[in-house]
Image: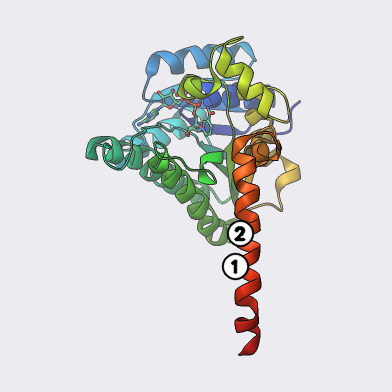
Amino acid sequence: MGSIDGQVAFITGAGSGIGRGIAERLAHEGADIAVSDIDVRGAQETAERVRAAGRRAHVVQTNVASERSVNEAIASAVDALGRLDITVANAGIARGGTILDMTVKDWQDQVDVNLTGVFLTVQAAAKRMVDFGRGGRIVCMASLAAELVGQMSWGYSATKAGVRMMVRGWGQELGKFGITVNAIGPGIIETPLAQMLAGREDGPIRKSVEQITPAGRVGRPSDIAGLVAFLVGPDAEFMTGSYIIMDGGLRDARAGMLDDPSDPRAVEAMELIVEEGQRRARLQPLIDER
Ligand SMILES: NC(=O)c1ccc[n+]([C@@H]2O[C@H](COP(=O)([O-])OP(=O)(O)OC[C@H]3O[C@@H](n4cnc5c(N)ncnc54)[C@H](O)[C@@H]3O)[C@@H](O)[C@H]2O)c1
């Protein structure tokens, strides 16, 4: 018997990568799974894995960017599986581009899926959970990119930073209904979406990521799925509005890349620190004078 035996979980983006890993793990923990994805083929494959774990699976094609589609998907999941205890708003896309090159279409698609999609999924699920009156658990997929930003990834980062903030607001509102809502910030996880970052097994990109990541490897969907299992299980009852990073230590390792004193960037950084110290020594008396 698992920790969430007999519960029902609705998972978006469950036809691939992290969402599929979450579906499999929650099935092993005893939940029946509504496998929601815009890609039915991927969703069906995930459903097979859920059934192989001995649980019921209901495939529901969903476009999370569409209010009608999300509402129909939640209704279909409840009809098929009888209840709704857990929702994972996981579907997401990444559209890179510089400020001079980003198309309005790419910008809008990314906002529609990563922000509006999470909003619509959580709203539809929370309404059902409130109606059922049994509380519930909601997990939203943000990203380490909510903390880090680059000239190609600012749009994606903005949507993921938005998810963090939405979750904090929703946590405040939904507590009185016994519903918790938390966000996860995965680092580099080996999935189709992050292939450019994770690289191929034994390829140069992978080797470099393994080298700079304190945990010594890229993440796996099962890593994130384990964290979701905790957040929807009995031990996380007192946790809501939170955001947890799971990145093998990558966030601070990136900052720590300048720790190598032979790195020319580290040399420059040291010079700048000295300059800043001189400037501060000059200005401090003026500050102290007031
Ligand atoms: N892989 C990583 O390194 C990583 C890191 C941080 C955050 N994330 C986030 O994790 C989540 C899952 O990503 P993944 O890496 O598993 O990617 P993935 O591409 O393997 O899976 C994403 C799934 O979402 C589905 N999807 C896309 N648009 C949709 C829509 N409009 N409606 C419904 N489903 C839709 C896709 O069909 C796909 O099955 C995303 O929110 C992503 O931003 C991933």
- Say which of 87 and 83 sits in front: 87
- Residue 97 versus residue 71: which sits nearer the camera? 97
Residue at 66% in and 28% down:
212
Within the image, what quadrant is residue 284 found in?
A: bottom right
Q: Amino acid at mark 2?
A: Glu
Q: Quadrant of the C terminus?
A: bottom right
Horizontal and vertical percent position of residue 100: 26, 41
User: What kind of residue is marked 1?
Assistant: Arg
Split into 4 quadrants, where in the image is the N terminus?
top right
Label 1 CA crowd tier, 10 Å (few <14, some 14–19, many 20+): few
Q: Residue at x 47, y 19 (%)?
A: 192
**Residue 260 in the image: above or below residue 42:** below
Q: Position of residue 155 (x, y in %)?
A: 38, 42
Q: Position of residue 271 (x, y in %)?
A: 62, 51
Q: Secondary structure at mark 2?
A: helix
The answer to whether the residues at label 2 and label 1 have Cβ atoms under 8 Å apart is: yes
- Answer with left or right where residue 120 lies relative to residue 129: left
Q: Secondary structure at mark 1?
A: helix
Q: Is the CB atom of the residue marked by disc 2 within 8 angstroms of ligand 1's nearest atom?
A: no
Q: Is residue 42 left or right of residue 268?
A: left
Q: Nearer the viewer, residue 286 or 88?
A: 286
Residue 74: in sight, yes or no? yes
Up-down relation of residue 224 to residue 122 (above or below): above
Label of residue 279 in the image: 1
Q: Which residue is mark 2?
A: 275
Residue furthest to the left in view is: 104
Q: Is residue 261 left or right of residue 18?
A: right
Note whether 159 is above or below 20 in the view shown. Answer: below
Question: Residue at 34% of width from left, 42% of height from top?
Answer: 111
Q: Residue at x 59, y 61 (%)?
A: 176
Name the foreground residue: 59 vs 112: 112
